[in-house]
Amino acid sequence: MSVEAAGFPADLPRPVIDGLVPFFQQALARDSRQRFGTPAQMLAAWTAALDATEAGAGTAVSTKRQPRRAAAPPFRPVSLDDVHMPAGLAGLDQLVTELGRRSGSSNSNTRKLVYLLVPRSPVDDPVDPLDTQAALGSALGITPASVSQQFGKLAELWRDQAELRQALEWLRAELDNHLAADGGVAAASTAVNWLLDVLPTGELTAPRRTATGLLRLLLELDTRWRPDSAWQRRRHGRTIATVARDPLRLDQADAVANRAGRLLREGTELGRWLVPAAVAVPALREAFEALSGQANDEVGSAVPDRVLLELAATASAVGLSAAGELHSVDAPVEAAVEAVLQGLPDTAEVAPDHLEQRLTARFPHVAATLPRRPGLDNVVRAVRPSLGWSPERRAYVSPVSAAVPETLATRLTTHGRPPVPGRTVSLSWARLGDGPVFRAVQVPTGYGDDLAAALVSLIDAQHVDVSEFLLSAMERQAAAGGVPWWDIVAADAGSAQDRQGLAAFVQQQLPALFDQVERGSRPVVLTDLSVLASYGLLPTLSRWADVTRPPPRTILALVPAGTRPGTVDGASLVLNSPEQSVVLSSDEAAALLAVADDRAHAPVDDGAR
């Protein structure tokens, strides 16, 4: 296809045409080898073309009505072509170690500040890394002005540390791209989640606290390295609550938080302490768009519903549940317990630790007020009178559940088939009735593939062979870039530098894997995690093991039986609860396979079709 300047509309300014012609000539070249090699290259060229056209067009082109306030400028993704994460710093624990090592002498205030913000283990002082400089100074025994000076010294120390600077620049670009995808504004807590998503936590015992401190360092460095284009931030009370690229976005975030507070006050007056997302989102979007001066314009529509809810939760008295509900952080614990028990069948058994985990996952702000037994007995009895404490089962049970064992035959149905009489098998080890959960299931040798197929049948699960998925994605990307697949295979047996490059290549496929696993509502069974283990990426699956952020659907990761929970080829999954590790005996595995086989060969009742 031929692209010439004469083919563009005559009313376009000539500088605009001159900027666009080279881009489209390369993008639409007849010879595929002359086109852009990767999406990132194409994005960078498109961004450069837009910049050139805007610079050349001047003020000659727009007659669009101006809003009451200037809208936030277009927010484009940042190309990662020029920056990369050094392989030796690709984990949060590795990066924290290097930050401390490069922060000055052992007794200097700069090093003390780094250790306070990004500790490798929990610190005694409960200081919030996003708190004021006065709070940080108080923890260190220095003045607020001295804290600012220490941040400045760190910026100078790290400016010329090539690998460390590259790692920090890569993280900044990643956060920029997340901001672009979310409309240019985010809650600080969401930015911390982004860091945890891209940085395996390794052996850190308090990764969220450490990632929060890393965000503070990135914000302070950005202010000093790029004073003219630094991230904007806004405090609620003493702590940094929101970050953005444009002050208007921060004003809009404040408007959302204020509207959320009003929604909760209005609901409380009517006796409702939860505001469902379906009710909250339209009101929050209206508040967000009001400051742009254009209802339903590109500024408002670019911000997803999820972001509006996260911004709402930055208000001091507003919490956000895992189900997207707004609630008061001072909500009565009885109401929260009633919400998490709602919908459980009469045959359910509810252990105290199970109840606490469900409450923590859905209402983390309220979970701290949950009493221990025997005080918990009164709370459960008040909201579910049918549940009573059973000393034998160490759980709250109803008279019905006391007589009915939890078995596959009584708890599950599949594809309209009736239960198979005679043979049953317990699934209590997986606690699948807990809602979306993550389980690392230790499988006896020789049962892996067959057990995955059985679970697909028995619980209507989706099967994802992780290594096969990653290798196929890598092969497709290599083919698209014109790289022979055997060159990739050879790198696995090559030098340490080759394997580092290959590890980065594997890591590029993780977003697609996460999307595959998280998309849908059926349970998912993961098998063969060996590629992740081989390249040190097994900890990335910890995104599903966070009990405060349950996975969107139940995930069962089948791993070989071993002496350590969730171990694959010597590498370990990061688990956050004893219930997340399940040891399946050979007898239990064999029983599951037998029941699956029975069901596969059972006659189908014509009336059930």
Image (cartoon, rainbow, N blue to C red):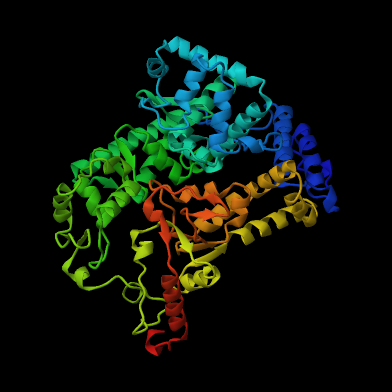
Q: Is residue 286 above or below residue 114?
A: below
From the top left corner, tell me how far across and down residue 434 is, in percent: 34, 59
Q: Is residue 85 visible?
A: no
Residue 423 vs residue 37, the one in the foreground: 423
Q: Residue at x 41, y 51 (%)?
A: 550
Judged left or right of residue 164, residue 562 is left
Residue 84 vs residue 105, the one in the foreground: 105
Q: Is residue 560 visible?
A: yes
Q: Quadrant of residue 187?
A: top left
Q: Residue at x 54, y 29 (%)?
A: 245
How many marks can you see?
A: 0
Q: Is residue 97 above or below residue 393?
A: above
Q: Quadrant of residue 241?
A: top left
From the top left corner, tell me how far across and down residue 575 is, in percent: 44, 49
Q: Residue at x 47, y 47 (%)?
A: 574
Judged left or right of residue 273, residue 531 is right
Judged left or right of residue 493, residue 435 is left
Q: Residue at x 83, y 53 (%)?
A: 32
From the top left corner, tell me how far across and down residue 386 is, in percent: 15, 63
Judged left or right of residue 539, residue 588 is left
Q: Is residue 115 above or below residue 398?
A: above
From the top left corner, tell me how far across and down residue 543 is, in percent: 48, 47
| Rendered-image quadrant of the C terminus | bottom left
